[in-house]
Image (cartoon, rainbow, N blue to C red):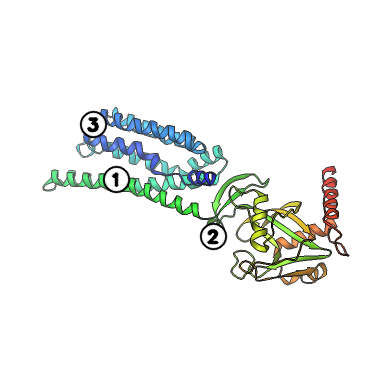
Amino acid sequence: MKRLRKQIQESFFNPILHFLPLIVFLVVDDFWGTKIAWLSSLPVATILFIYIFCAYRKIFEWFSISTGIYFFVALSVSFLPVEKLPVHIRDVAFEYLLLIVFVVSLVFRKKIEAIVYKRNLKQISMSNNLNEMFRMIWILGGVIFVYVHVYTFLIIFDIPHLEVSLHFLHSSYLLVLLFVVIYELVRVTVVRVRLLKEEWWPIVNDQGKMIGSIQQMVSLTDPKKFMHPIIRIVLIDGNRIYLQKKEQNSAVYPGMWDAAISNHVRMNETIEKCINRTAYELYGLQHLKPLFLSNYVHETEQEFHYAFLFVVCNLPELKPNPKYIEHAKWWTLKQIEDNADERIFTENLLIEIDLIKRSGLLESEHCECDCKLKNTINDISENERMR
């Protein structure tokens, strides 16, 4: 649970933290001047810098860039010759400068993302954090844009009760900034708690190495496909294979016949734990010791499968859990081959049948024992290593 919580925090970093030193500097500078603004915002930037370094090491390099932007903007304001600026710009010079920085960031968004992805190998967590970062730039940029333009309008047209109107505008502006900060802190906390209760899947590359994680339903509904590790266990009895029929509301291959045991590996879950969890949930089997046969990659409509294929024979009588399995039965190899073109079997199963046929594990007679199965698989593995 601790590792999952850390993974969620890294995948959903609070974007307001990038801008907190700038917001503190901006607010304090308006009330008490630049010197006090430095004394107030610098400790905030330092504490956040240390906090990110200790708690969010994967995105520390990216956060250091936002810290650099804070120093650039704050130093620019400190040495800006405000007295030489037009009267309608003097009091909002900081906001104008910050608005320019935001606009430049949005214009060069693709180049910024390319640099970050190159440095972070396109990690899913960084992709989400970048989206959150630019979302916050749009929000803060919109607030500042409205404020400076209304302020400029009031100054240029010198409306009645100008001082009262400017004071009201400035107070409203600061209240909106405060609301944005509080809202983001609450929003991210709520989202993290919700995500912690949901099922997360690891994302792997073509070699099976984990490169990120994503919530289950997000993965299945996102137009972009992600590769997830799954376990697949084929139950063999002689020349027969035990299959289960997937439910009609299944997200993948609804109503089709599939391997008896199949499931996604959860975040921070080992292959062995996933096997034990799934075997117990589906059939009440405990301490299942399947033999590993092969890995393969397969693409479905929603995702890519990085499958770990196992086989088991000579199991006791199987008792499917009606909560998860409505129909299950033994199929002979001939029955499966005769119906292979009828689109009643999952593509994963057909791949596995071919692998098992080529391995010679399906005997014409009843399987003698799991030792024979083990020896056969060991012979296959030895031959593959010698190639």
Mark 1 and mark 3: span between their CA atoms? Answer: 19 Å
Q: Is residue 320 left or right of residue 51?
A: right
Quadrant in which the C terminus is drawn: top right
**Which residue appears at 82% of the width and 52% of the height?**
374
Which of labels 2 and 1 is toward the front? 1
Q: Earlier in the sequence, mark 2 or mark 3?
A: 3
Residue receiving disc 2 = 221
Q: Amino acid at mark 1?
A: Leu
Question: x%, y% of residue 330?
Answer: 76, 69
Q: Amino acid at mark 3?
A: Gly
Residue receiving disc 3 = 33
Which of labels 1 and 3 is toward the front? 1
Residue receiving disc 1 = 178
Question: x%, y% of residue 358?
Answer: 83, 57
How many numbered tags mark residues here? 3
In-front residue for pair 50/142: 50
In-front residue for pair 64/228: 228
Mark 3 is surrounded, within 10 Å at the Cα level, by few (under 14), some (14 to 19) or many (20 or more) other residues, namely some
Q: Earlier in the sequence, mark 1 or mark 3?
A: 3
